Amino acid sequence: MTQTSETVTYSLESVLTRIESKIDSLQRDVNQKIDSLQRDVNQKFDSLQRDVDQKIDNLQRDMDQKFDSLQKDVNDLKVEVTEIKGDIKTLDQKVETMDKRLE
């Protein structure tokens, strides 16, 4: 059994056209993969941004509540100080009255 060699000839134009077609196909694949990767990255960034925004909002809400609570405590203390000052003034007057009686 002997093999005969056959020669196939292609024109340079057809070979170049096939090569160009393969390059174009590869370029489309690469572009699609890059686009897909970009979409995935954008979605992940968007998701992370939403998470960060939500955490910042929660932190701001907590800080506002704590500030409001502290402000209420300060106001309560001011009222109590005013009441104590009034009590001290009343006691001073009573002590003065007692001193005058003792004189």
Image (spheres, rainbow, N blue to C red):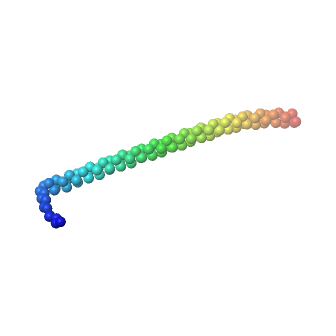
- Judging depth in this view, the residue of 65 and 54 nearest the camera is 54
Spot occupied by residue 39 in the image (x, y as percentages of width and height): 36, 46
Q: Is residue 88 above or below residue 41?
A: above
Spot occupied by residue 50 in the image (x, y as percentages of width and height): 45, 42
Spot occupied by residue 79 in the image (x, y as percentages of width and height): 68, 35
Q: Is residue 77 left or right of residue 33?
A: right
Name which quarter of the figure residue 95 lies in. top right
Q: Is residue 16 above or below residue 79?
A: below
Q: How many tags in the picture?
A: 0
- Judging depth in this view, the residue of 21 and 99 nearest the camera is 21
Q: Is residue 55 left or right of residue 19?
A: right
Residue at the spot x=59%, y=41% of the render? 66
Of the 4 image quadrants, the one containing the C terminus is top right
Residue 24 at least partly seen: yes
Residue 89 at least partly seen: no
In this view, the residue farthest toward the front is 1
Spot occupied by residue 56 in the image (x, y as percentages of width and height): 50, 43
In this view, the residue farthest toward the bottom is 2
Residue at the spot x=30%, y=48% of the render? 32
Of the 4 image quadrants, the one containing the N terminus is bottom left
Q: Is residue 60 above or below residue 26?
A: above
Residue at the spot x=79%, y=35% of the render? 91
- Judging depth in this view, the residue of 70 and 65 nearest the camera is 65
Q: Is residue 21 left or right of residue 29?
A: left
- Judging depth in this view, the residue of 22 and 50 nearest the camera is 22
Residue at the spot x=81%, y=34% of the render? 94
